[in-house]
Image (spheres, helix red, strand yellow):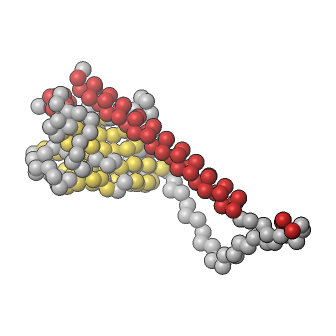
Amino acid sequence: MQARLWLLLAAQLAALHGSLALVQTPAFLMVQTNQMVTLSCKTQTSPSNTRIYWLRLRQALSANSHYEFLAYWESKKTVYGKEVDSEKLTVHGNPPQNVLTLQNVKPADSGVYFCMIIGIPNLIFGTGTQLSVVDVLPTSPQPTKKTSPKKKVCHQVPTRVTQKRLSCAPLILGLLAAGVLILLVSLGVAIHLRCLQRRARLRLLKQFYK
């Protein structure tokens, strides 16, 4: 049975979230064009005959994001998704370890790669690997000489009696307020990205219902 038909049959019992963990390494990877890339997916809770599927989000997470089925490993061979280049991509290994290899990567191969297993009743996704393929890697900053940091001192201003001591409290309060604001903004962004990822997974299920 073809991969798409199998996913369609199993996804009818699948929800969006599961309790089993699929750990992917590395979490982030930046490589130059034409290099080889190896991504790993590991689980210690699934039977050895469990299929591990590989998916990709090519574009940045948005309201229009969707998962692209790549391949899975079965019976000593790689089963590919539609229009996947078998000379570029290979998958091998049964649980608990499964590996995806990409040859001669290009910038178009950049994206977030997920491994996934079909549980009952859940689709269980891995932690994801962000792959960035660039023509030139960013240069490392040159090392600088270490200098002893100067201690910050609140200088006393010899003016009126009420201004003899300059308090540092307003500066500290300002920094604390800025830190709280940054945390709130980060939390809002994280919640927004989570919602977008949920929408993308819903589109994955709808794709197989067609």
In the picture shown, does residue 98 fall above or below 148?
above
Identify which residue, 140 or 123, lies in the foreground: 123
Q: In this image, 58 relative to 49: left or right?
A: right
Identify which residue, 68 or 186, lies in the foreground: 186
Residue beneath the point at 43% across and 30% down = 63
Furthest residue in direction bottom, as rendered: 148
Q: In this image, 9 relative to 70: left or right?
A: left
Q: In this image, 115 relative to 57: left or right?
A: left
Give the quadrant of residue 207.
top left
Residue beneath the point at 24% across and 50% down = 21
Residue 87 appears in the rendering: no
In the picture shown, does residue 154 fall above or below 53?
below
Q: Position of residue 164 (x, y in %)?
A: 83, 70
Furthest residue in direction top, as rendered: 210
Furthest residue in direction right, as rendered: 159
Q: How many marks?
A: 0
Q: Position of residue 93 (x, y in %)?
A: 17, 52
Identify which residue, 169 or 4, lies in the foreground: 169
Residue beneath the point at 55% across and 64% down = 140
In the picture shown, does residue 204 fall above or below 117?
above
